[in-house]
Image: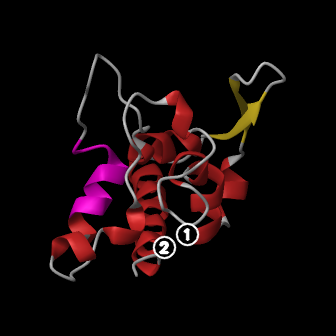
Amino acid sequence: VGFLAFANTSAGELVITEQPLEWQDVAHLDGGAVFSNLCAACHGPGGEGNGRAVGAFNRTVPDLTTLSAKNDGVYPYSRVKSAILGKTRVVEHGTIDMPSWGEQFSNVRPSGSALIRHAYARERVRLLTRYIQSLQG
């Protein structure tokens, strides 16, 4: 997992760089901090789909604050979790815009059994899913 930094250059171009984010650092982050580090560049700090990287995509970035409203007032926990895990990927034009965070979180812990790495990833996804739930209007 890396921290994605988005910045505008003097020519107005979007530059995407990646800095290593050690698993020990990620392991201690709560859902809001994980969101700020990994999701806000695209979804915006408040989850409205207005992050700094939005211009790099050929489609709109989902507004995560309206998920419950669009689902008859019920937060679609399982659907959000599946999207974060990468299980409900929609591939358009040969690319996937959002990383499969479940896979990324599983690979970020360098040691331990597959069971430990997957438990670690599930906990990160759970925290992130709960945080997105807190963004609902």
x%, y% of residue 97? 40, 33
Q: Quickly name the residue at label 1.
A: 31
Residue type, numbered disc 2: Tyr
Residue type, numbered disc 1: Gly
Tell me if residue 58 comes above or below residue 87 in the rendering.
above
Q: Main secondary structure of the magenta part?
A: helix
Image side of residue 89 versus residue 102, left or right: left
**Residue 8 falls within the magenta-colored stretch:** no
Residue at x-position 54% and y-position 46%: 42
Residue at x-position 39% and y-position 42%: 60
Quarter of the rendering containing residue 89: top left
Is disc 2 placed on a helix, strand or loop? Answer: helix
Which portion, as a residue range, is magenta? 79-88
Disc 2/disc 1 C-alpha distance (Å): 5 Å
Q: Are the residues tagged 2 and 1 within 8 Å (C-beta)? A: yes
x%, y% of residue 121? 45, 55
Of 77 and 102, nearer the camera is: 77
x%, y% of residue 47? 50, 62
Is disc 1 placed on a helix, strand or loop? Answer: helix
Image side of residue 119 versus residue 14, left or right: left
User: Could you classify mark 2 by the number of other residues whose Cα lies within 10 Å: few (under 14), some (14-19), or many (20 or more)?
Assistant: some
x%, y% of residue 125? 42, 61
Tell me if residue 19 comes above or below residue 73 in the rendering.
above
Residue 5 can be seen, yes or no = yes
Q: Earlier in the sequence, mark 2 or mark 1?
A: 1
Q: Quickly name the residue at label 2.
A: 131
Of 69 and 112, nearer the camera is: 69
Task: Name the quadrant of the N terminus.
Answer: top right
